[in-house]
Amino acid sequence: MASITLENLTKSYGDTEVLHHVHGQIEDGEFIVVVGPSGCGKSTLLRMIAGLETITGGQVHIGDRVVNDLEPAQRDIAMVFQNYALYPHMTVRENMAYGLKIRKFSKAEIEARVREAAEILEIGDYLDRKPRQLSGGQRQRVAMGRAIVRHPKVFLFDEPLSNLDAKLRVQMRLEIRKLQKRLGVTSIYVTHDQVEAMTLGDRLMVLNKGYVEQFGSPIELYSRPASVFVAGFIGSPAMNFLPAHAEGGRLTLENGAVIASTTAASGPVTLGIRPEHLVADSQGPIRLAVDVLEQLGANTLVHGVLAGTRTDLTASLEGVRDIPGGQELAFSAPPEALHVFDRATGQRVGD
Amino acid sequence: MVENRRWIDILTHVVLIVGIAIVALPIWITFVAASHDAVRMTQAPLPLLPGGHFWENFTATLFGSGLSGTEIAPVWRMLLNSLAMALMIAVGKIAISIISAFAIVYFRFPFRMGFFWLIFITLMLPVEVRILPTFEVVADLGMLNSYVGLSLPLIASATATFMFRQVFLTIPDELLESARVDGAGPLRFFWDILVPLSRTNIAALFVILFIYGWNQYLWPLLITTDTSMTTIVISIKQMLEAAEQTPQWNIIMMTALLAMLPPIVVVITMQKLFVKGLTETEK
């Protein structure tokens, strides 16, 4: 068990800096999810912590050691790879035992640890099979088993579920969460899937183009996104963004509609409203010209534009609705559901 | 083909049988010739059916002096020489090329690609081209008439290095990383992961290289002057030119048959791995 400190971490390839001054304090036993679109540097960050990439600047502490110059094996970490990276010529048992064998554990100790991990992950029945005889979900378990047997201080997960089908992914997601709670090992998990991030993490680190956009609990990110990027990335369906002009707490939309708010910002802003926070209200100021509907059963997503403009707007209504295209719906939004961002910088302003 | 017509089946079989007959005929004639006595082989027409002297010729060739009235080594000795040379060439080539491919693929050192191209360029310099300087070197090192002299100059192999490089490139990087996280150093990774994963490729290469080594003609001819070091392939030619007498076809053909055997044994025993090594893609 150990805490991890990332101190001013940077990574460059030649002259191109791909990670910029990443800071972060990860507590002992915490489950951190690093999330961002592809190419944002999240895997690079994980691999720097693992020791598979060199660190250009800054420091990584695991526990009270600076591990910058240590080999991955010396950092006391275990990693689960996206494509599992199981040794194809070894049985499940040999795969899990390999790291222990290299560390010269006794035969009895290896056997005990493999049994223990196999029991936790329910893979005891196929210890003598080769990876190619296993399904994707089973391989995933073996890959986690290989991490568990080492009793490392830190688990690192590099998009471990992205090769699984949707149903299995949901199931494995829960299992990873339970497993981490049970073992209490500090974990860092990289994914591009925001649902996975929201459901798994104690805290989320949102990365964009190598910058940390926000680092906080899922609910914090959902209810108080620090930037347009985080606001658009977290939450499904994605937040609506409307250009607006703020003055004296009032927000004027492109089509002239005025929304009351508590914002202290003034000047050109971007107004963010989540589709699920739009309340149908025939007197409401926000008018939506309906284009298409998406029926999800429990609710209906209404896609269209802000009336009189070409700005996309989506609302989420409960239950099954049947609204003809071209019709206009009116909505209002409670002041606490309005997110105001500076139009130029995209940063949250005004509260 | 999805066509399921009887005459097409018959036609394909006829074509195949004719093809096999054409390929097999020389081997059949060799076998027939090896089973007659010397006198019958000098008479026309050539026999097309086996005679009754097969085992007689067999023991005479293998354990006797072989050809009467000449001073060449017994055939078993030459088989042994060939076997030693072919094995040393095959094993040596595989060992050296797998190590160089390992270095080129997995280590970052200055001029890495330069070395790779250097190795690759040697493809343009087969034994025949560099035979004089090579002979000079081998002679100066006192390796004439020795197994080392027979095999060492043929051991360096750009083709095998290139092939192992391609095999290693198909092994996902994550396996290396996962081994690093597990604490395996470069040598452990090589022995525990790379070699087992290249097993089928090693087998395929072994078959090809063994036959390559077995069939060497020019080089052994050049550096073996001692008759006890001649290889079987050379000896067949020598038997034909044996001093001032009619070729003893029965013995010569028996020698040819014996010379064919080891490559056949190697191909048959390693056939499965051989095919796998050339076709298997899953890593």
Image: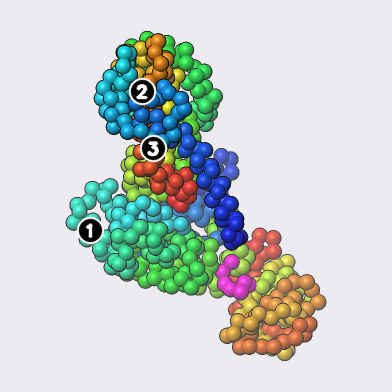
Disc nearest the viewer among 2 and 1: 2
| Rendered location of residue A341, percent (x, y) | 65, 67
Q: Pinpoint residue A140: horizontal percent, then vertical percent.
A: 41, 62
Residues shaded magenta: A233-239
* For discs 2 and 3, the disc positioned in front in the rendered view: 2
Task: Tell which of B174 and A241 is nearer to you.
Answer: B174
- Measure the alpha-carbon separation of dots 2 and 3: 27 Å
Q: Is residue B151 visible?
A: no
Please give the residue where the numbered disc 1 appears in the rendered image: A111
Residue A234 placed where, x, y %?
A: 56, 69
Q: Is residue A238 left or right of residue B105?
A: right
Q: How many marks?
A: 3
Q: Do dots 2 and 1 share one subunit?
A: no
Residue that badge 2 annotates: B38
Instruction: Please say if A251 is above or below A144.
Output: below
| Chain under numbered label 2 | B
* CB within 8 Å, label 2 to label 1: no
Separation (CA) of disc 1 from disc 3 = 45 Å
Q: Secondary structure at mark 2?
A: helix
Q: Secondary structure at mark 1?
A: helix
Give above or below for A97 relative to A54: below
The residue marked by circle 3 belongs to what chain? Answer: B
Kind of residue at badge 2: Ala
> Please, what secondary structure does the residue beneath circle 3 have?
helix
Q: Amino acid at mark 3?
A: Ile
Q: Main secondary structure of the magenta part?
A: loop
Quarter of the rendering occupied by the C terminus of chain A: bottom right
- Magenta includes A201? no
> Looking at the picture, do discs 2 and 3 lie on one chain?
yes
**Same chain for marks 1 and 3?**
no
